[in-house]
Amino acid sequence: MARTRRRPARVVLRAVVTDIDGTLTDASRRLDPRAVDAVRRLESSGVPVTLATGNVLPIALALHRFVGTTGPVVAENGGLIYWPEGTGGTVERRADRRVALRAWRAVRAAGVPARRLFTDRWRESEVALEPNVGLPSVRRAVRGLPVTVESTGYAFHLIERGVGKLPSLVRALGRIGLGPRDCVILGDGDNDVAMLRAAGFAVSFPSASRRARAAATYVTRSDYSAGFEEGLKESGLLP
């Protein structure tokens, strides 16, 4: 059953920010054509779409180009920002990966049998672990280090403290004259909570984490891409 919180007064929604895994994809993390169609309808109507993901920049950049989004890209949970300026674009690194690597060594030294994700070979600002161990054990191992452990539901991310999707999103949007309050923001993980709370209209899903659902303006009836389209219609940005 859908749930809606009161929408803030005098908010004019002008853009969309969306997570990727579990939002534009199905439960198996396959990109859903219905979500692609919804994004292209938004872009055709002059609504820029920004991707904000815990995934690596090569994956996010491929979606940005092949799906046709025009907004900036926030990757690695805010560790990287990509602005699609000109033909090449520019990248800003927002976190020191040496901090994350130090935390990874602490996890190993504590005897926690965590494994790094296959995509870690392309990460520039963080370390991501398979969720094959308990999150509390990882957090205990890095206690006292200047690092945050974020859960996306698909992985655990070790990233320099103070870095996250929201602060990088604020910077990314600011460069194009927008802020989170101007946006519909869609997400399903604990790492999306801060930006959902800052949104003009925040959408989450039945399959989302408890904290993400609690932060949302609207929790959809449907999951994944069907919920993505439903939430955008509820916001008024899609007919």
Image (cartoon, grey):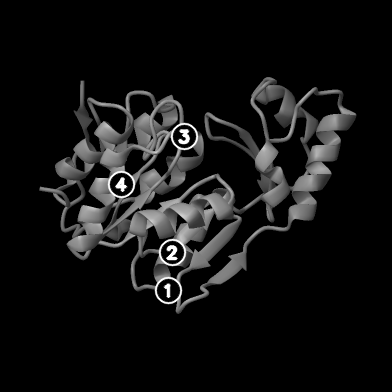
- The amino acid at mark 2 is Pro
Q: Who is closer to the viewer here, 70 or 175?
A: 70
SS category of the residue bearing label 2: loop
Q: Which residue is pictured at 86% across the width and 23% down the height?
A: 111
Is 71 positioned to the left or the right of 145 in the image? left
- The amino acid at mark 4 is Val
| Camera sees residue 164 | no
- The amino acid at mark 1 is Arg
- The amino acid at mark 3 is Gly
Q: Which residue is pictured at 35% across the width and 59% down the height?
A: 69
Q: Name the residue under label 4.
A: 36
Say which label, 1 or 4, has the lower sequence index: 4
Q: Are marks 1 and 2 in contact (CB under 8 Å)?
A: yes
Q: Nearer the viewer, mark 1 or mark 4?
A: 4
Q: Name the residue under label 1.
A: 175
Q: Nearer the viewer, mark 4 or mark 3?
A: 4
Q: Name the residue under label 2.
A: 72
Q: Is residue 104 above or below residue 167?
A: above
Q: Name the residue under label 3.
A: 189
Residue 148 screen position, x and y as percent: 66, 42
Residue 51 screen position, x and y as percent: 42, 53
- In three-dimensional space, the C-alpha distance between marks 2 and 4, rounded to whole angstroms, equals 17 Å
SS category of the residue bearing label 3: loop
